[in-house]
């Protein structure tokens, strides 16, 4: 879910570099954060509805996402405006969603696999959608 949301939000945002910050990189990063949130949930077996180790790991995941955003901000002009919202969406939505999904009996594993397939397909299909000039060379129109 986070990847789909992040992809759709990234399209109208002004990317500092469409080659690096496009739907593919945003979507695949969000899928990766979702996988990490699932792994954290799996590793943090607890009697509590949400264990301390999951909360601590989730905090580290959010800090890591923001660190990536800040690192991008040091390399590209105005990158923070683009990367911080997407980093927060890509980390917080999976963290909250994982706890809900783990407790849900309505969805089965194949439903989540379907969401991942849709997110990856959207990432690839929308990778070329950008806000910068195409950069294609052409002759000026005849006078």
Image (cartoon, grey):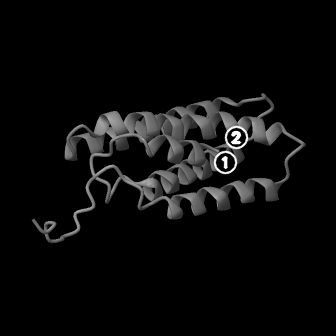
Q: Which residue is mark 2?
A: 98
Element type where label 2 sits in the image: helix
Label 1, label 2: how far apart the Cα atoms are: 6 Å
Q: Do residues under tags 1 and 2 come within 8 Å of each other at their CB atoms?
A: yes
Residue located at (45% from left, 39% from top): 87
Query: Label for residue 38?
Result: 1
Disc 1 packing (10 Å; few <14; some 14–19; many ≥20): many
- Quarter of the image with the N terminus is top right
Residue located at (58% from left, 61% from top): 120
66 displayed left or right of 77: right
Q: Residue furthest left?
A: 143
Element type where label 1 sits in the image: helix
Q: Position of residue 22 (x, y in %)?
A: 40, 54
The quarter of the picture where residue 139 lies is bottom left
Disc 2 packing (10 Å; few <14; some 14–19; many ≥20): many
Q: Position of residue 32 (x, y in %)?
A: 54, 54
90 displayed left or right of 35: left
The quarter of the picture where residue 101 lies is top right
Q: Position of residue 103 (x, y in %)?
A: 83, 37
Taking depth in this image into account, of 100 and 38 the one nearest to the observer is 100
The quarter of the picture where residue 98 lies is top right
Taking depth in this image into account, of 129 and 5 the one nearest to the observer is 129
- Quarter of the image with the C terminus is bottom left
Taking depth in this image into account, of 95 and 27 the one nearest to the observer is 27
Residue located at (85% from left, 47% from top): 107
């Amino acid at each position: 879910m986070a990847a789909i949301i992040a992809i759709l939000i990234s399209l109208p945002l002004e990317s500092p570099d469409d080659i690096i910050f496009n739907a593919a990189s945003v979507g695949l990063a969000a899928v990766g954060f979702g996988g990490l949130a699932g792994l954290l949930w799996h590793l943090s077996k607890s009697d509590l509805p949400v264990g301390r180790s999951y909360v601590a790991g989730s905090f580290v995941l959010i800090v890591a996402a923001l660190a990536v955003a800040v690192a991008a901000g040091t390399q590209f002009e105005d990158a923070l405006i683009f990367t911080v919202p997407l980093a927060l969406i890509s980390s917080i939505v999976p963290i909250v969603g994982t706890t809900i999904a783990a407790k849900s009996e309505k969805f089965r594993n194949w439903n989540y696999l379907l969401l991942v397939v849709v997110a990856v397909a959207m990432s690839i299909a929308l990778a070329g959608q950008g806000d910068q000039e195409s950069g294609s060379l052409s002759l000026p129109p005849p006078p």
